[in-house]
Image (cartoon, grey):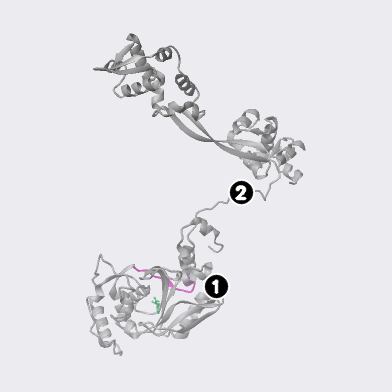
């Protein structure tokens, strides 16, 4: 301990507590310190004491004490007397009494209790003839004349509620229901440590010093002739955690900003869609494995959603069957119009894009959407059944593949990733198709798909020019940004854990 420094850093209240403790022989309860010292509130004593404890000048010893006060029955007994005593009075009038005589002063419930205790205390003998008869004993006679120990105790507890008592001395009262109320309270004793004693012996003085510079202190000029206590900027202070947005929300905001700055507009869509918009309009063949129950979550209620765009439906059906209005050969199967109405939870945000194109077929447009999608995935360190996609399109007269690569590279560059590569991919709705990967921590990570929409997708919705499209995984990106190894960590709601994550 640096004695000089420790003394210098003591507050007025800490000094007062130390000096008072010294007077009280180095050990006292907060109440005792309050009484003997010149602090005004117990919280001041406790605050100062916990600071002193953190400086190792005092110890605070907590102990539990069991205290008692009168319960409902106890209060009754105090007023009317114990039932056995009241019964005894009736018996003593003639030396004996029948059970029925007791009802003069005792209720139906009290009689068996009184009889039980009369026997236990040996105040009366019980004889059974035709009736049950109670006869007073010599013990009983004595008891009538005096205040019994139990009666004295009851009175004492009544006079000092929350009194600390030895349980073994009040055993018989404790066996009776609702006579006593028991409560555990924690009391503290503040004890000077050796360091504390050293501080006191080297002399501490209580000066009238300013510990907080308030406007009054400045206005009145009192600071001119008083000492000002130094701030201890290394003093311990508890962490304060204000409310803040979930890190994923922050990330989504950041991504939105980037697209908005790059000249994009935002669109949104619904979680529930008919199969038509999520699959058929995107030229996904009706026997595609992604449509399988194992991959897509279909709804029970409603099972079906009517497709209102009847004309488009006809056109799309033909495109699937034989290419229809396009120069394609289609998939060459019989298109089912029942299949299109199945209600599902959207499996990708590309459904927002195709709806947008149908409603806005004229170029130029640059739109993006960030939304949750659903797939029947088993949960593991890289898969969740619900996740976000960052979706976007560029629809311009002369858009081309190089532009698509450029825009995606620019997006990731703005997100803080310099090394990006693309490799060929496959999606039923794009041609060419590619996968985007970023290099992070010595590894290439796949972040999403993209490509140019096929004419089988664009022509039915009245779009004549090439449309550049992409759908990127948000959680994967978040894992890289926040340096997480397990995707599930993104949605842990354990605050203590979250606060320990440097990036989150
Ligand atoms: N929809 C694709 C997916 O969910 C991504 C994608 C979007 C691919 C747009 C190409 C074009 O993985």
Q: Can residue 106 be seen in this view?
A: yes
* Residue that label 1 marks: 416
Looking at the image, which residue is at 71% across and 43% down?
Answer: 9
Q: Can residue 219 be seen in this view?
A: no
Q: In terms of secondary structure, where does tag 1 sit? A: loop
Which residues make up the magenta segment? 258-270
In the depicted structure, whether residue 346 falls above or below residue 5 = below
* Residue that label 2 marks: 237
* Mark toward the viewer: 1 or 2: 2
Looking at the image, which residue is at 50% across and 75% down?
Answer: 411
- Residue 371 percent location from the top left of the image: 40, 68
Q: Quadrant of ligand 1?
A: bottom left
The part of the image, by quadrant, that contains residue 428 is bottom left
- Residue 404 percent location from the top left of the image: 46, 82
Q: How crowded is mark 2: few (under 14 residues within 10 Å), some or many (20 or more)?
A: few
Q: How many labels does the image show?
A: 2
The part of the image, by quadrant, that contains residue 189 is top right
Q: Earlier in the sequence, mark 1 or mark 2?
A: 2
Looking at the image, which residue is at 66% across and 48% down?
Answer: 235
Contact, mark 1 vs mark 2 (Cβ under 8 Å): no
**Is residue 269 magenta-colored?**
yes
Comparing 50 with 71, the one in front is 71
Q: In terms of secondary structure, where does tag 2 sit? A: loop
Label 2 beta carbon less than 8 Å to ligand 1: no
The part of the image, by quadrant, that contains residue 309 is bottom left
**Is residue 344 magenta-colored?**
no
């Amino acid at each position: 301990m640096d004695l000089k420094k420790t003394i210098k850093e003591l507050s007025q209240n800490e000094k007062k507590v130390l000096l008072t403790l010294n007077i009280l022989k180095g050990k006292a309860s907060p109440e005792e310190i309050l009484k003997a010292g010149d602090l005004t509130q117990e919280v001041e004593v406790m605050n100062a004491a916990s600071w002193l404890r953190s400086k190792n000048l005092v110890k605070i010893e907590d102990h539990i004490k069991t205290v008692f006060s009168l319960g409902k029955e106890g209060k009754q007994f105090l007023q009317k007397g114990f039932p056995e005593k009241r019964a005894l009075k009736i018996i003593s009038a003639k030396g004996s009494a029948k059970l029925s005589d007791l009802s003069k002063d005792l209720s139906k419930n009290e009689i068996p209790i009184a009889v039980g205790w009369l026997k236990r205390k040996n105040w009366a003998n019980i004889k059974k003839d035709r009736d049950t008869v109670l006869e007073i004993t010599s013990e009983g006679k004595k008891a009538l004349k005096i205040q019994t120990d139990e009666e004295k105790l009851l009175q004492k507890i009544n006079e000092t509620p929350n009194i600390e008592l030895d349980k073994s001395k009040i055993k018989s009262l404790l066996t009776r229901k609702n006579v006593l109320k028991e409560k555990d309270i924690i009391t503290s004793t503040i004890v000077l440590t050796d360091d504390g004693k050293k501080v006191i012996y080297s002399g501490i003085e209580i000066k009238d010093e300013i510990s907080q510079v308030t406007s009054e202190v400045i206005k009145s000029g009192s600071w001119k002739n008083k000492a000002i206590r130094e701030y201890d900027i290394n003093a311990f202070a508890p962490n304060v955690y204000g409310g803040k947005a979930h890190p994923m929300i922050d990330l989504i905001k950041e991504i939105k900003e980037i697209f908005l700055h790059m000249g994009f507009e935002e669109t949104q869509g619904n979680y529930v869609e008919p199969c038509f918009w999520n699959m058929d309009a995107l030229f996904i063949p009706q026997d595609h494995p992604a449509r399988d129950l194992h991959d897509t979550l279909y709804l029970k209620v409603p099972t079906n959603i009517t497709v209102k765009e009847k004309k488009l439906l006809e056109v799309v059906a033909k495109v699937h069957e034989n290419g229809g209005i396009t120069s394609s050969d289609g998939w060459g199967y019989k298109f089912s119009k029942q299949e299109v109405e199945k209600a599902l939870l959207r499996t990708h945000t590309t459904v927002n894009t195709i709806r947008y194109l149908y409603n806005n077929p004229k170029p130029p447009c640059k739109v993006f959407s960030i939304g949750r999608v659903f797939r029947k995935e088993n949960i593991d360190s890289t898969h969740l059944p619900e996740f976000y996609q960052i979706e976007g399109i560029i629809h311009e007269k002369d858009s081309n593949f190089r532009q698509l690569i450029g825009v995606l590279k620019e997006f990731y560059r703005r997100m803080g990733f310099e090394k990006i590569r693309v490799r060929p991919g496959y999606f039923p709705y794009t041609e060419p198709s590619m996968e985007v990967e970023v290099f992070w921590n010595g590894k290439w990570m796949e972040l999403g798909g993209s490509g140019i929409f096929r004419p089988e997708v664009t022509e039915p919705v009245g779009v004549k020019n090439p449309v550049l499209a992409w759908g990127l995984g948000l959680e994967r990106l978040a894992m890289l940004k926040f340096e997480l190894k397990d995707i599930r960590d993104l949605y842990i709601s354990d605050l203590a854990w979250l606060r320990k994550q440097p990036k989150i």
